[in-house]
Image: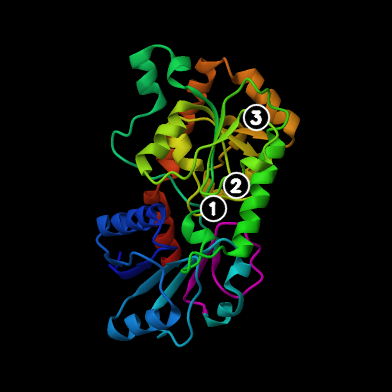
Amino acid sequence: MKKFKFLLIPKSNNFREIININEISYQLKNLGHNCFTLKSQISDDNLNFILEEEKFDFVFRVNRGKPKNINKKTRFISWVRQISDLNESLVNFNENDLIYTLKKTDNNHKLKINQLLPAANYFNNIPKVEDFHLVTGRLETFQNIDISILSNYSRVDLFNGNKGLISNSNKINSDKHKKIHKLLDNVDEKYKILIFSLINYSNLVINKNIVYQGEINNFNYLFEIFRKSRFNLLFEDEFLDFNSNFFNILLVQGIVLANKKISKIFENPINNNFNASNLVFLFKTELEISNIIKKYYENSNLRLKIGKDASKFVSEYHTYKNRVEQILKDIEE
């Protein structure tokens, strides 16, 4: 395969976005490609300036579109939530470019548009639930959080450069928290529920066992929460976001509780016939989520078995190594 020169641009300077873009860079470099990775998003004008000064075969840009007047020899790859996010910049793409969406898209355009999911951040020898089970012999003692929820929204998403709230993002964030609270209304108050979020919405809480813990800024601590929780309730309810915890929870053998709508993202051949119902607890209603928790709360052996199967599957098919292989395959077609 020909070796390419890539410019990689993250969604923001949030530590999770930087880790994700660095993983893509690492996998590309492992295959012999040359990568220049920025540490934050930049304006279209600044991007045009960089491309006038330095030649790249590909620009991979997260959550933003293609600027005007890009040299046709530089092929552009945009990774966005959904095709509507590109708005007016969609006309700047040509048949040699590539657009990836998180949400599955019906391609009614003459452009190359594919789905690209986020992935697990794979580390060698990362501790998993079974490691602590072998040491302690009692998973119930180790997993001292009954249910955890981690918000996907960071300061970059919710605040502008002047520390003012971004109204649209904050409304979406607030609405999602309201939905989560409603889902948990029927959950017995004997269960300990922790929500990790930049903004404290405890004033909306009806279930008094819901406790807000603040934002997590330590990547290793995220995995600690995933392992120590009997159930990890997924923040997204329709499609996985860029910094979704979904695959990382499964990687360390954590248990995911997710809205059944999420399973639609896997109705695609690239996902290797992933049957979400075998590896993830799916629900439609408040009553279903309550029943799942009651049924499996004490069954640590079954939860561990599901966790092991899910981790094996994610390690094989849903790391950034797999995503880079998909990107390189798509750009060669």
Disc 1 is placed on an element classified as: loop
Which amino acid type is marked by label 3?
A: Lys
Which amino acid type is marked by label 1?
A: Asp
For marks 2 and 1 on the same chain, the one whose residue lies earlier in the sequence: 2
Residue extending farthest to the top is 137
Is there any visible trace of residue 313 in the rendered image?
Answer: no
Residue wearing tag 1 = 241
In space, the residues marked 3 and 1 are separated at their CA atoms by 29 Å
Residue closer to the observer: 2 or 53? 53
Which amino acid type is marked by label 2?
A: Glu
Label annotation for residue 40: none
In magenta segment, residue 105? yes
Residue closer to the observer: 172 or 112? 172
Density class for disc 3 (Cα within 10 Å; few <14, some 14-19, many ≥20) is few
Label annotation for residue 208: 3
Q: Is the magenta stretch mostly helix, strand or loop?
A: loop
Q: Residue at x 37, y 72 (%)?
A: 58
Residue wearing tag 2 = 236
Residue 307 against residue 46 in the figure, above or below = above
- Whole-percent x and y of residue 90? 57, 77
Residue closer to the observer: 103 or 138? 138
Disc 2 is placed on an element classified as: loop
